[in-house]
Image (cartoon, rainbow, N blue to C red):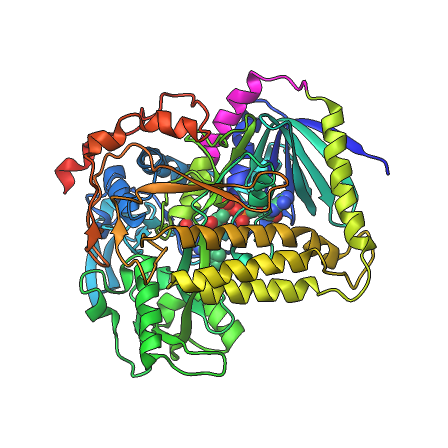
Amino acid sequence: MSTDLISTDVLVIGGGLAGERCAIEAAAAGHDVLILSLVPPRRSHSCAAQGGMQAALGNCVKAEGDNPTVHFLDTVRGSDWGADQEVASIFTQEAPVAVRELAHLGVPWTRVRGGKNSYVIKGQRVEIEEHIENDGLIMHRDFGGTAKWRACYAAAATGHAALYAVDSEVVRLGITVRDRMEAVALIHDGGRCWGAVARCLRTGRHFAVVSKATVIATGGYGRIYGQYTTNATINEGMGAVIALNTGVVPLGNMEAVQFHPTALAPSNILVTEGCRGDGAYLLDKDLHRFMVEAEPEKQELASRDVVSRHMKQRMRDGKGVDTPYGPHLWLDLRHLGEQHLTTKLREVWEICRDFVGLDPAKDLVPVQPTQHYSMGGVRVNKDGQAYNMAGLFAAGEAACWDMHGFNRLGGNSLAETVVAGRIVGRRVAEFVAKSSLDVQTGLAFAATRTAEQRAAEWLGRSGNGPSVYDIRNAMGETMMSKVGIFRTGDELEEAVAEITAMLADCDKAVLRSKVPGMNPELTFALRLKGMLRLALVTARGALLRTESRGAHYRSDYPLRNDAEWLSRTLVRWAVDADEPAFTYEPVGEIDLPPGHRGYGSDERIEMRESLQQYNDGVYERQAEHGRLATAEAPGSRLRRGEWKELV
Ligand SMILES: Cc1cc2nc3c(=O)[nH]c(=O)nc-3n(C[C@H](O)[C@H](O)[C@H](O)COP(=O)(O)OP(=O)(O)OC[C@H]3O[C@@H](n4cnc5c(N)ncnc54)[C@H](O)[C@@H]3O)c2cc1C
């Protein structure tokens, strides 16, 4: 077989918001950039994002007093103290710039309307006079877990508007994009990454892309939960897989999986948190608004992990609406009125009309919590540089940067894509400026040949082995039923055993279609083992973490345990090893001490050591786990103690 090899300064794997924003930064610095994407970039998952993007602009009355420090407090509390606080600090300071920049790129943000405006807040309709001098500024809506209205939005199509604007800039800069291409392996020598092997999804041909720097921006991996996710079918986690397959790059916090309260039942298409932000509420089968008792202060706008647990519990208590597909609850949007629904929540209105035949101005909408977001991912330092592997970077949902810890706040992910894209892109450009492409081509050819052999081996299997789709469906059932919203040691052990058996089955699976070129079954088969590995490290990570933190809730260990678990999980899977290896690093330097989040339970096991003891040598300990040196000194962007006047 012939092997093609192409070279570039920067290879960006992923054409979503994070990948494209990063590519723009590197290209603007004068470097050659190549983007690979499974789909045309505008069909990346970012396009589906609905409700908004958090940035502390403070433009409307309910946002008055907001600033990056308040946003920092919300983000760290939301993360249940699992976040890297320096990264949260960098993010919250830069989000306002990134959002305004999007306006310049053409995002049609919904704007403040000066004068009298009518809103629904905590179930009550209220009139608020927006300042005339703020007329025309970017508007905010309320979102879960925030002290102020902060989410900037373009109706309920925020991701669509942002991705089209950013992609237009990619086109304007003449950045090369090759879509329907899949990165299937990294080219590396165990300590330095030199690009990736790609497979053309139309022809099945493999080729090598050698690069001075490589960025993984492949989004989340919700599809390890099968159909029980709001994620697109392309969100299968191959970026995390190719990093894990190096044997040396760790993934961070894989057990931190977010479940969104309001997916449409039974299809699991998302209905944005912006609905509850704009005043929609949750009802049980008796049309009782249970969140008012469950969370008197934040009600439906507690963080997603908290609301999802209350919903699941409500259904376990027999208060769900029974259907042949299982129980669901109701989202009531009727009081928002048709005018509001067909403008500020237009896409939600269309989704309800087109997918369940309902008019949310008149009908209750059936909802259930489902998998939504991957807080875990390729572990990187504050520059986006992967642990243990020079030349490899990651950004966006694929990365564990880690500003979300164990629970991401709504609206913080879209904002992360563009903030991280800017920062990581700049660091990539600096790295490339100092590098030369002195890679051994033999390394690239060998990696390509290995990938070709894997495909040939799948095509060469015969007999009556299991189908790859049956294994995929079984994986989804196990993940949702045993590694879901409520977790127990017994169920997690079962999940680990079941996924281990599926991994063995994967080696015996046989394809029905033997076409080497455009063959979706082969394409999926090539991903399946990696997806099962992600499922396994998620389940095992959840089994090992014997506490509850954010979205990781252990019914048998219901308290957050800062004495033993104020740490980030790292998992590596050595080449040829049967088992993954888990280690734990400190979450980072702690500025805001662990405390009550302001919603959910305030019972917890306190730290035994002082903050000073925890923080002493924290960066050295992270370096022992593989954190590479950063451009600026570690901790230099923490604005220590700045939050004190606010609490
Ligand atoms: C329905 C929905 C609504 C959401 N709404 C919001 C919201 O309102 N606010 C918010 O903050 N967040 C929201 N989120 C989350 C947010 O949209 C995502 O986290 C974010 O858009 C991810 O962007 P990304 O660039 O990291 O990845 P993506 O947009 O998922 O892009 C990944 C890219 O990688 C490519 N790719 C993947 N694997 C490979 C491979 N092996 N080789 C080559 N290319 C590859 C894909 O083709 C794609 O181009 C929502 C999520 C969902 C599911």
Q: Main secondary structure of the magenta part?
A: helix
In the image, is 84 to the left or to the right of 457? left
Q: Quadrant of residue 524?
A: bottom right
Where is residue 586 shown, x and y percent of the image?
A: 34, 36
User: In this view of the protein, can residue 383 be seen by the observer?
Assistant: yes
579 or 171, which lies in front? 579
Where is residue 377 shown, x and y percent of the image?
A: 48, 44
- Name the residue rendered at 31%, 74% in the picture: 314
Q: Quadrant of residue 554?
A: bottom left
User: In this view of the protein, can residue 256 be seen by the observer?
Assistant: no
- Name the residue rendered at 44%, 50% in the picture: 541
User: Which quadrant would the C terminus be assigned to in this image?
Assistant: top left
Where is residue 181 shown, x and y percent of the image?
A: 69, 44
- Name the residue rendered at 41%, 26% in the picture: 623
Q: Which residues are magenta?
A: 421-438
Q: Is residue 430 magenta?
A: yes
In the image, is 169 to the left or to the right of 3? left
